[in-house]
Amino acid sequence: MTSDIHLAFAHPSERAAATQSGDPLDRISVRDHVIEVEIGAFQAERGTTQRVRFDVVVEVRPLEGPILDDVDRILSYDKVTEAIATELAAERLNLLETLAERVADRILLEPQAMRTFVRIEKLDRGPFALGVEIVRSRPLHVVEDVETAVHPRVVFLSNAAVHSDHLPRWIDQLAADETPVILCVGPSQTPAPQTQVQAAQRRIDLLAIEQNAWVLAGRDKRCVVVGTMTELDWSMKNGQIAVWAPSKIVLDAVDGPSAQPSDTMALVAWFAGHIDASGLLCIGTQPGQAMEFHTVYHDGQSATL
């Protein structure tokens, strides 16, 4: 029992050794890697950073033949710290469990990596460390399924377009194209509640957009409201017409939009750049207005063609 308790709280390197089976594997480790990051599901954890400590052990396939002091032949420690940095930069997360899963998955993309222990702890939530540890492995022979990046078309619909009799025909035309489509709207013409607190107003304005997204979904049953990157990814791969509900993606983005939600077109342009869209279409601000095509750059800016 004493040994079990010790191993439960021991460094991942000791846990790796204790759970070893079969032929021994080499190990590399990164210890006490502390980063300040915004993470957490509680409201008090939003808009502020806290210290998070990473301890990672990677079991690697032994090299065949001498190392020859060649850094290109080994799994570098940098791959571990890069996996952490990449996942932290991807989006703001609520759960350490999610972050640990993504870091482990990214590490296991390395051809030499066979099993990894990832421990992540919050250091500033009290006079103690709160954390999670996971173990992930892969079979000896793995063929990675490399997916082709999807570049959807983002389409902004004005309120006039949302309520136009031409809406079903426009959606018919968009659905006929093989390029995935994500529809975006602004708030309805009904004024949203107002407050002097900027953070609160931001959420109110984002929710006003989401309410209008549901209005659009009610106008055509092919339109499905989605609010997470996972839902968007699934939607694009399964031929749905997605309608963007912006709150979670905007609030969780590491590099969020500088524009306020009240500046609808700037927000939509940011979103198009954020997901690396192939283009941004606008169905006009007046009834009967023709489409305008915009090329979208990675910084979210657009230029009318």
Image: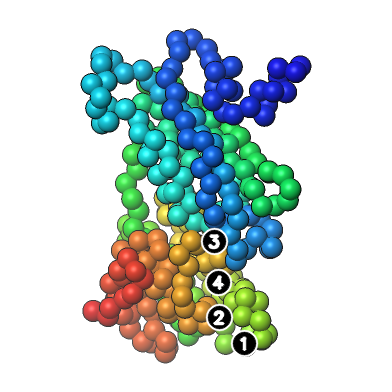
Identify the image quadrant of the N terminus.
top right
Camera-nearest label, 1 or 3: 3
Mark count = 4
The Cα–Cα distance between marks 4 and 2, rounded to whole angstroms, is 8 Å
Q: Nearer the viewer, mark 3 or mark 2?
A: 3
The residue tagged 2 is: 187
Residue linked to disc 1: 190
Q: Name which quarter of the figure residue 227 lies in.
A: bottom right
Q: Is residue 218 visible?
A: no
x and y percentages locating residue 239 in the rendered image:
42, 54
Above or below for 212 versus 136: below
- Verify CB contact (< 8 Å) between mark 1 and mark 2: yes
Task: For marks 4 and 3, give the one nearer the viewer.
Answer: 3
Contact between labelled residues 1 and 4, with CB atoms less than 8 Å apart: no
- The residue type indicated by label 2 comes to Pro
Q: CA distance from mark 3 to mark 2?
A: 20 Å
Under circle 4, the secondary element is helix
Query: Do the numbered discs 4 and 3 sit on residues whose CB atoms are within 8 Å?
Result: no
**Marked residue nearer the N-terminal end (4 or 2):** 2
Mark 1 neighbour density, 10 Å: few (under 14) some (14–19) many (20 or more):
few
Q: Which residue is mark 4?
A: 213
Mark 4 closeness class: few <14, some 14–19, many ≥20 residues within 10 Å? many
Secondary element at tag 2: loop
Residue pictured at 75% horizontal, 18% vertical? 2
The span from disc 4 to disc 3 (Cα, nearest Å) is 19 Å
Residue 182 falls in image quadrant: bottom left
Q: Amino acid at mark 4?
A: Ala
| Quadrant the C terminus occupies | bottom left
Residue topped by disc 3: 252
Q: Earlier in the sequence, mark 1 or mark 3?
A: 1
Q: Residue type at mark 3: give it.
A: Asp
Compared to 228, does 218 lie above or below? below
